Image (cartoon, rainbow, N blue to C red):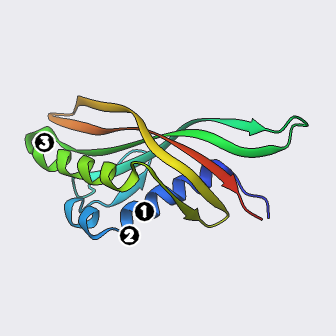
Amino acid sequence: MNVIESYVGLEFIIATLTNDATFVSLAPGGAVRGAAKVGIAMPCGCVQFMSGIDVLTANAIRMMVNAVYLVKSFGPAANTPAVAAVAWAIDALLKRTSGYAPGGAILSCYRENNIFYDEDIGSVKYTHIGGLYRLQTQAMP
């Protein structure tokens, strides 16, 4: 079975978040790939693949992918405490963990950088809180 390790990592993160009762209770918008859609309940979690490096053997056989994902909470700045609570739940679930997703194994997962910024969309200020998470993902036949 051919598999794209970056997709395995994405599925692992989303499954980890959406299968946790605390995250689900704090993030009524759930966990979405990429940007939150207009009209989604907030706060929510957003997951985006950022970059990855293949780790190869001496004869160029891919052993795993060392990838970075942006994982953040998103919601109105007027409700920053709720957005921060979602970010806390995300970090509690993803820090120093490992596991499996269909097609592969997550050998390690940890946050290597944090993020916190605001942006104006229309007449509303939104807050993004989260981090860049590094996952080492290996395909499994």
Instruction: Name the foreground residue: 50 vs 133.
Output: 133
Q: Residue 80 carries which label?
A: 3
Q: In this view, does 122 lie to the left or right of 17?
A: left
Q: Name the residue under label 2.
A: 19
The Cα–Cα distance between marks 1 and 3, rounded to whole angstroms, is 23 Å
Toward the left, the furthest residue is 78
**Residue 23 position (above or below residue 51):** below
- Residue at the spot 40% in from the left edge and 55% down from the top edge: 32
Q: Residue 46 carries which label?
A: none
Discs 3, 2 touching: Cβ within 8 Å: no
**Residue 78 position (above or below residue 12):** above
Badge nearest the viewer, 1 or 3:
1
Discs 1, 2 touching: Cβ within 8 Å: yes
Q: Is residue 47 left or right of residue 100?
A: left
- Circle 2 SS class: loop
Q: Name the residue under label 1.
A: 16
Name the quadrant containing residue 42: bottom left
